[in-house]
Image: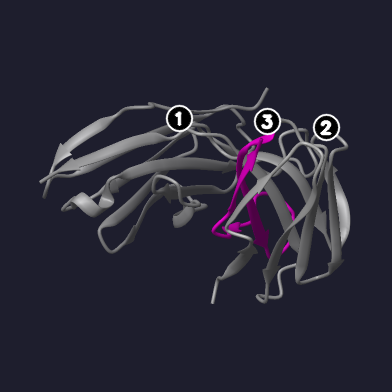
Amino acid sequence: QKEVEQNSGPLSVPEGAIASLNCTYSDRGSQSFFWYRQYSGKSPELIMFIYSNGDKEDGRFTAQLNKASQYVSLLIRDSQPSDSATYLCAVGTSDYGGSQGNLIFGKGTKLSVKP
Amino acid sequence: DTEVTQTPKHLVMGMTNKKSLKCEQHMGHRAMYWYKQKAKKPPELMFVYSYEKLSINESVPSRFSPECPNSSLLNLHLHALQPEDSALYLCASSQVATRGETQYFGPGTRLLVL
């Protein structure tokens, strides 16, 4: 069973702080990793994707990938109250057509940024 | 442009009704997906269409019937649903359906079955 694990939270950080969201996955053959943000009652919105080990930065967001540890994280710098949402980690499966489809989602981490 | 559109935004139906959900994308993507999402849960894959052919059906009950009329459109026909089918139904698309391509989600249809 291929799995993606996230701490469900809630993770509470003060405005202006760095929020760190973590995700582990079980399929060692996975090659693609995604972070989606989902506001309550809305659909998931792609924040970042990462394919290679290391860091990838986009504005206030940094994705970090360590394939050896099967670990991916998302850092949000200068957190704002508008960042308050559930963050879904999704991992591309290593085999097309598997029973899990081609993206496996974690259960999401709820982030709350306090003014 | 990474827009996927879905209609209707909200739908209320009785258990004997027949209704359809529609999804459209104009990004030239050749893979389209239906997901079901219950409150406080991650999206749950239902169907995958690749090049207008159904490639994955995640053991979804036959009261849900997908259709892909062309590469830009995806429908989900609903018949004789149960109250437990109430959920947010999400459509997504990606360039192709291999090895975890980036998927872009539509805004969803919130379905309530009475």
Between B98 and A28, the residue placed more toward the observer is B98
The residue located at (50%, 49%) in the rendering is A34
The residue located at (47%, 57%) in the rendering is A46
Say what amino acid the circle numbered 1 marks. Ser
Q: Which residue is mark 3?
A: B83
Magenta part of the chain: B85-114
The residue located at (18%, 53%) in the rendering is A80
**Element on which disc 1 rests:** loop
Looking at the image, residue A21 sits to the left or right of residue B66; the answer is left
Say what amino acid the circle numbered 3 marks. Pro
The residue located at (47%, 40%) in the rendering is A89
Q: CA distance from mark 2 to mark 1?
A: 33 Å
Q: Which residue is mark 2?
A: B59
Asked if residue B56 is among those painted magenta in the image, a careful observer would answer: no
Quarter location, residue B113: top right
Q: Which residue is mark 1?
A: A69
For marks 2 and 1, give the one nearer the viewer: 2
Parent chain of label 3: B
Parent chain of label 2: B
Image marks 3 and 2: residues in contact by CB distance under 8 Å: no
